[in-house]
Amino acid sequence: MQAIAESVALGQKEGLDRHRLFEVLSRTAVIAPAHLGKLSRADRGDYSAQFAIRLMNKDFGLVLETAAAARVPMPATAAAFQMNVAEFNEGKEEDFSAVITLMERLARVETSDVGNRSVAAPCQVRVQSFSAAR
């Protein structure tokens, strides 16, 4: 879900329509069928708890605890857990898909209340090339 949240925030920041982003993402092979309903609800701004973020945090904790005991590093899971904790600290009983709103806030993307449309202006991106030192 974190990757989806980041994709939505970046797309909006670059001027793409939020509804269109959800529509396109829902048709890609990388979105699990279980997440299709989450995307549809998020598109409508509905983050009511279907699977509460507090329960996802519990599961993240169990996975990370098991991984640590098995000495298996899980950096992406740990990072996603931290983002979930940050959204959980907002104090709302929300679905774990609410990390989308966290990423939108961090990206300073504004959405209108009507139709949940992106109102963000595109930003300028400067790409810098790095060559390996020899």
Image (tube, rainbow, N blue to C red):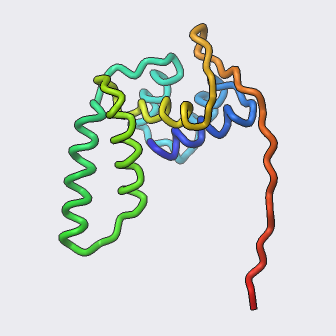
Q: Between residues 20 and 131, which one lies in front from this camera angle? A: 131
**Image x and y of residue 116, in percent:** 58, 16
**Image x and y of residue 67, in percent:** 25, 66
Instruction: Identify whether 66 is placed above or below 132.
Output: above
Q: Residue furthest top?
A: 114
Instruction: Identify whether 58 is placed above or below 111.
Output: below
**Image x and y of residue 32, in percent:** 44, 42
Residue beneath the point at 18% across and 70% down: 69
Q: Quadrant of the C terminus?
A: bottom right
Residue beneath the point at 67% across and 32% down: 12
Q: Between residues 37 and 116, which one lies in front from this camera angle? A: 116
Left or right placement of residue 43 versus residue 132 in this view: left
Q: Quadrant of the N terminus?
A: top left
**Residue 75 lies in quadrant:** bottom left
Instruction: Identify whether 46 is placed above or below 88.
Output: above
Residue beneath the point at 53% across and 22% down: 43
Instruction: Identify whether 126 is placed above or below 75.
Output: above
